[in-house]
Image (tube, grey):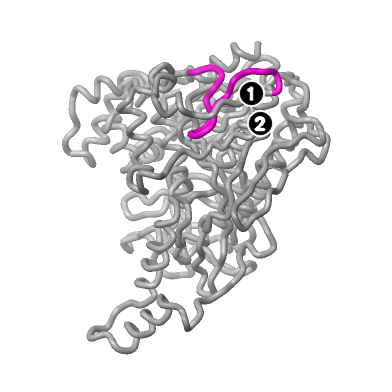
C-alpha cells in the first residue's frame, strides 16, 4: 500500500501522538480539581487578572502556563483545551451526540460524504451525496461555512431536533428532513474482510472503549466466512486506553498470562493479566506495525512478540512507553499527566529517550528518515543507541531489545513511490473526494456491488488527465515531474476514495491493500 494513502486516511494519528495517548482508565480519570490559592501559578494569574496594565485573556495564559510546566516533565504530559479534550474523549469513548454524518464543504455547500449506519441521519433517510441548503429554515449553503460553524449547528443535546433542507444528487428538488440528534457510535475498526482464502484482515485505528467488542464482532463474521489465519493491522494506530489494549491481547493469549505491567514513583507495580479465554488463541497471527504505531499498539505488539504468539511485520514502532492519566477541570479542559511507565512481559521498556529535549524528541521520526532506517533494517541495527540497548528474550528464546519501540520480526521498507508534495497538497485541498463527488458518481452508480467495482473498475488515463485539469483550478502550479511520478498513486487514491464514498471504509482499504507490500509479506509469513 502506498504509505501516503494510509497517512491520508488517518489524519487523526499525529494529533493522538502529539497529546500522548496512552491513557489509564480509572475512577478519577476526569477528577476535577483546582489550583490552591497559595501556590505561585495561581497567585501570578490572580495578579495578572486584577492588576496588569492591559486587558488580557487570563484563561489562555493559564493554559500556556500549565502546558509549559507539563512539557518540562516529559513529551506526553500536556494541557488540553476544552474542545481538544472533548474531541479526544469522544473518539476514545466510542461516540458522540449528533446526527451521524461525515461531510465535505465544496463551493461553500455542505455535501454529505458518509452516513453512519443506524445513526439519526440514516434513520431519517438521508443518503451520501445529499447537499444541505438550509438548516432550521435558515440559509446554510453559501454562508462562508467553516468546520467550527458546522459543528455548532449539527452537534447538540440528545433528542434535540434539527431540520435540514436537502437537494438530492442529480435532482433540483428540495426535500425537508426532521432529524432528532442521538448517540452516534464510532467504531475503532477501519476495515475487516477476507484478504485471501482463509486469511482475515482487521485494521484497528485506535484503542477505544469499544475496541474489544468491535473486534469480536468482526472476528465472528470472518469466522463464518471461513477465516483460519489473521492479519491485524496496527499501522498508524497512535494508541488509546491501556485497558482496551489488554482486553484485545486477551483474545490471543492463554488465561493468566502477563500482558503488561506498569510502575512509577507514585504508582506501585500493577500487572495486567489475561482474564478470559479469547476468541483467537490458536490461529496463525501476523501484526503489522510502523513508525506511527504507538503506546497501546506497542503494548499489544510487544506482548504478542514476547510470547512468540504472532509474527510482527513492518518497521520499528514509535517508542512510547509512558502511561497518561487524565485529570479534568470544571471548564472542560484537562491535563494528561504521565503517571507510570509500562513494560512488556519480558520486562522491556519501549519508551525511547527524551533526554535531549522535547524538540529533538518530536523530530526523532524525521531523523529516522535521514538515517535511512525506514528503508534499511541494517541502518537501525548498526545504530549506537540500539547496540547499547538492553537485551531480553521471548518465551521461545529469541532476542528482543528495549529502549525505543518494537522491532519487527519481518522488516518491510517504506514505499515512497509517488509519495510527493503534490499528493499531500491534493489531499489537503480535499480534491480526491471533490472529484469523486463532481465527476465520478455516474460511473459509481453503474456498479451494483462493491466487489464488482473492486474487481472490474480502474482509473484510465483520460480520467487521470481530467483529474489533473480539475485539480489545476485549485492548485494553480503543479510540477510536471511530480505529476508523472505520482500518476499511479493518484489513480489508486481516486479509486479508493470513490470506493469509500459509495461503500465505506472497508472498500477503501481493499483498494489500498491491493498493492500493499507489507500486507503481502504478512500473508507469506503466516502461510
Q: Position of residue 74 (x, y in %)?
A: 45, 52
- Image-quadrant location for residue 89: bottom right
Q: Position of residue 82 (x, y in %)?
A: 47, 66
Q: Is residue 392 visible?
A: yes
Q: Residues within 10 Å of mark 2 (few under 14, many from 20)?
A: many
Pointer 2 residue: 346
Horizontal side, residue 130 vs residue 367: left or right: right
Q: Position of residue 482 (x, y in %)?
A: 23, 25
Pointer 1 residue: 393
Q: Is residue 500 visible?
A: no
- Disc assigned to residue 335: none
Residue pushed farthest bottom? Answer: 50
Residue at image point 29% right, 79% down: 56
Rendered-image quadrant of the C terminus: top right
Q: Earlier in the sequence, mark 2 or mark 1?
A: 2
What is the CA distance from the residue labelled 2 to the residue labelled 1?
Answer: 7 Å
Which SS type dominates the magenta stretch?
loop
Q: Please determine whether, in this image, residue 383 is positioned above or below residue 58.
A: above
Q: Please determine whether, in this image, residue 31 is positioned above or below residue 211.
A: below
Q: Please determine whether, in this image, residue 390 is positioned above or below residue 72.
A: above
Asked if residue 208 lies in the magenta stretch, the reply is no
Q: Position of residue 12 (x, y in %)?
A: 46, 46
Residue at image point 76% right, 25% down: 223
Q: How many marks?
A: 2
Would you say the residues marked 2 and 1 are in contact, meaning their CB atoms lie under 8 Å apart?
yes
Q: Toward the viewer: 371 or 384?
A: 384
Magenta residues?
Answer: 395-411
Residue at image point 57% right, 29% down: 233
Q: Residues within 10 Å of mark 1 (few under 14, many from 20)?
A: some
- Image-quadrant location for residue 346: top right
Q: Secondary structure at mark 1?
A: strand
Amino acid at each position: 500500500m502506498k504509505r501516503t494513502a494510509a497517512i491520508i486516511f488517518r489524519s487523526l494519528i499525529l494529533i493522538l501522538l502529539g497529546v500522548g495517548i496512552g491513557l489509564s482508565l480509572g475512577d478519577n480519570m476526569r477528577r476535577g480539581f483546582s489550583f490552591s490559592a497559595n501556590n505561585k501559578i495561581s497567585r501570578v494569574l490572580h495578579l495578572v487578572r486584577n492588576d496588569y496594565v492591559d486587558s488580557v485573556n487570563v484563561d489562555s495564559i493559564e493554559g500556556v502556563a500549565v502546558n509549559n510546566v507539563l512539557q518540562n516533565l516529559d513529551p506526553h504530559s500536556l494541557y488540553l483545551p476544552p474542545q481538544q479534550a472533548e474531541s479526544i474523549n469522544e473518539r476514545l469513548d466510542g461516540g458522540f451526540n449528533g446526527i451521524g454524518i461525515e461531510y465535505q464543504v465544496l463551493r461553500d455547500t455542505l455535501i454529505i460524504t458518509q452516513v453512519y449506519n443506524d445513526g439519526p441521519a440514516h434513520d431519517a433517510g438521508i443518503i451520501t451525496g445529499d447537499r444541505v441548503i438550509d438548516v432550521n429554515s435558515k440559509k446554510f449553503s453559501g454562508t462562508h461555512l467553516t468546520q467550527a460553524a458546522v459543528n455548532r449547528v449539527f452537534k447538540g443535546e440528545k433528542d434535540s431536533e434539527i431540520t435540514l433542507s436537502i437537494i438530492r444528487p442529480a435532482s433540483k428538488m428540495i426535500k425537508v428532513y426532521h432529524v432528532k440528534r442521538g448517540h452516534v457510535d464510532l467504531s475503532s475498526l477501519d476495515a475487516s474482510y477476507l484478504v485471501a482464502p482463509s486469511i482475515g484482515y482487521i485494521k484497528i485505528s485506535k484503542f477505544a472503549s469499544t475496541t474489544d467488542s468491535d473486534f469480536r464482532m468482526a472476528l465472528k463474521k470472518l469466522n463464518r466466512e471461513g477465516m483460519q489465519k489473521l492479519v491485524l493491522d496496527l499501522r498508524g494506530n497512535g494508541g488509546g486506553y491501556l485497558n482496551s489494549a489488554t482486553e484485545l491481547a486477551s483474545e490471543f493469549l492463554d488465561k493468566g498470562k502477563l500482558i503488561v505491567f506498569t510502575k512509577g514513583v507514585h504508582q506501585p507495580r500493577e500487572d495486567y493479566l489475561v482474564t478470559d479465554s479469547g476468541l483467537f488463541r490458536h490461529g496463525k497471527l501476523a501484526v503489522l506495525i510502523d513508525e506511527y504505531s504507538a503506546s497501546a499498539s506497542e503494548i499489544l505488539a510487544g506482548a504478542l512478540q514476547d510470547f512468540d504468539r504472532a509474527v510482527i511485520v513492518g518497521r520499528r514502532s514509535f517508542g512510547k512507553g509512558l502511561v497518561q492519566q487524565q485529570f479534568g477541570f470544571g471548564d472542560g479542559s484537562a491535563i494528561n499527566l504521565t503517571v507510570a511507565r509500562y513494560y512488556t512481559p519480558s520486562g522491556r521498556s519501549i519508551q525511547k529517550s527524551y533526554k535531549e529535549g522535547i524538540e529533538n524528541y518530536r523530530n526523532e521520526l524525521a531523523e529516522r528518515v535521514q538515517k535511512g532506517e525506514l528503508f534499511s533494517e541494517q541502518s537501525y541495527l548498526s545504530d549506537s543507541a540500539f547496540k547499547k540497548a538492553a537485551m531480553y528474550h521471548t518465551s521461545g528464546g529469541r532476542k528482543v531489545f528495549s529502549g525505543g519501540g518494537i522491532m519487527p520480526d519481518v522488516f518491510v521498507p517504506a514505499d515512497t513511490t509517488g509519495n510527493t508534495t503534490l499528493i499531500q497538497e491534493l489531499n489537503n485541498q480535499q480534491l480526491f473526494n471533490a472529484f469523486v463527488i463532481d465527476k465520478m458518481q455516474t460511473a459509481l452508480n453503474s456498479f451494483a456491488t462493491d466487489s464488482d467495482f473492486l474487481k472490474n473498475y480502474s482509473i484510465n488515463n483520460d480520467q487521470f488527465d481530467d483529474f489533473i485539469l480539475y485539480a489545476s483550478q485549485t492548485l494553480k502550479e503543479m510540477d510536471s515531474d511530480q505529476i508523472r511520478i505520482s500518476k499511479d498513486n493518484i489513480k489508486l487514491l481516486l479509486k479508493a476514495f470513490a470506493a469509500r464514498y459509495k461503500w465505506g471504509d472497508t472498500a477503501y482499504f481493499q483498494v489500498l491493500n491491493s498493492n500493499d507490500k507489507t500486507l503481502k509479506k504478512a500473508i507469506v509469513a503466516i502461510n
